[in-house]
Amino acid sequence: MIIPINPSIIEYKSNIRNLCRVPYHGHSKGCPNFGKKQGCPPNQKLINEIFDFEKELYLIYNEFNVGNFAQRMLEMHPEWENFPRQIYNPRRWQPVARKEHKQEIINFFIQYPNSLVNSSPEANGVNVSKLMKSVGIELNWNWPPEHNLENKTYIVSLGGYKIK
């Protein structure tokens, strides 16, 4: 999905990038790429230093029904019924979701030549949860989620034109 958005709805702050340091399963200090991988915080510019906020920006996202994917995993591996981390393991569903998102980005470049896409808006201080909520999508923060066929996840990018 490609949606034109007014840059004024984008909330961004440098401290948003610290979300990468929040502990999660298997990573007590947060993301191991923080401060190491190119494109990761804390040494990234804020989003308003990348895109020209005088021009229209675009929200580029795809919705991936991880609940349906998990159901297929459960059907293939019924022994995982009591192990939601197995059926919702990102290593299983993320490649499929990322491939779909990559196609959406290709579609964006076809529609908007000479544009720029940022595939990690959080690394540039964007509050993605608030941005998605502003377009009517409430993100689910329970992970792993209770098994439900309606569980969806989103991959979000921003598109626009480079600041001069």
Image (cartoon, helix red, strand yellow):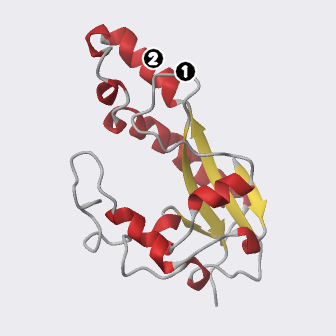
Q: Which residue is mark 2?
A: 71
- Estimate the spatial distance between the alpha carbons at disc 2 and disc 1, rounded to whole Å: 7 Å
Q: Amino acid at mark 1?
A: Leu
Of 104 and 14, nearer the camera is 14
Location of residue 115 with respect to 85 vertically, above or below: below
Residue depicted at x 51% and y 73%? 125
Location of residue 34 with respect to 65 vertically, above or below: below
Residue 141 picture location, percent across and down: 49, 45
Q: Is residue 6 left or right of residue 160?
A: right
- Give residue 135's mark: none
Q: Is residue 23 left or right of residue 152?
A: left
Earlier in the chain: of badge 2 and badge 1, it is 2
**Dividing the picture into quarters, in which one does residue 20 lie?**
bottom left
Q: Residues within 10 Å of mark 2 (few under 14, many from 20)?
A: some
Q: Assign the C terminus to one quadrant of the image.
A: bottom right
Is there a contact, CB below 8 Å, between mark 2 and mark 1?
Answer: yes
Q: Secondary structure at mark 1?
A: loop
Location of residue 111 with respect to 163 vertically, above or below: above
Residue depicted at x 30% and y 50%? 24
**Dividing the picture into quarters, in which one does residue 109 lie?**
bottom right
Of 116 and 32, nearer the camera is 32
Q: Which residue is mark 1?
A: 149
Q: Secondary structure at mark 2?
A: helix
Residue 145 picture location, percent across and down: 45, 32
Q: Residues within 10 Å of mark 1 (few under 14, many from 20)?
A: few
**Dividing the picture into quarters, in which one does residue 50 lie?**
bottom right
Q: Amino acid at mark 2?
A: Gln
Residue depicted at x 73% and y 58%? 111
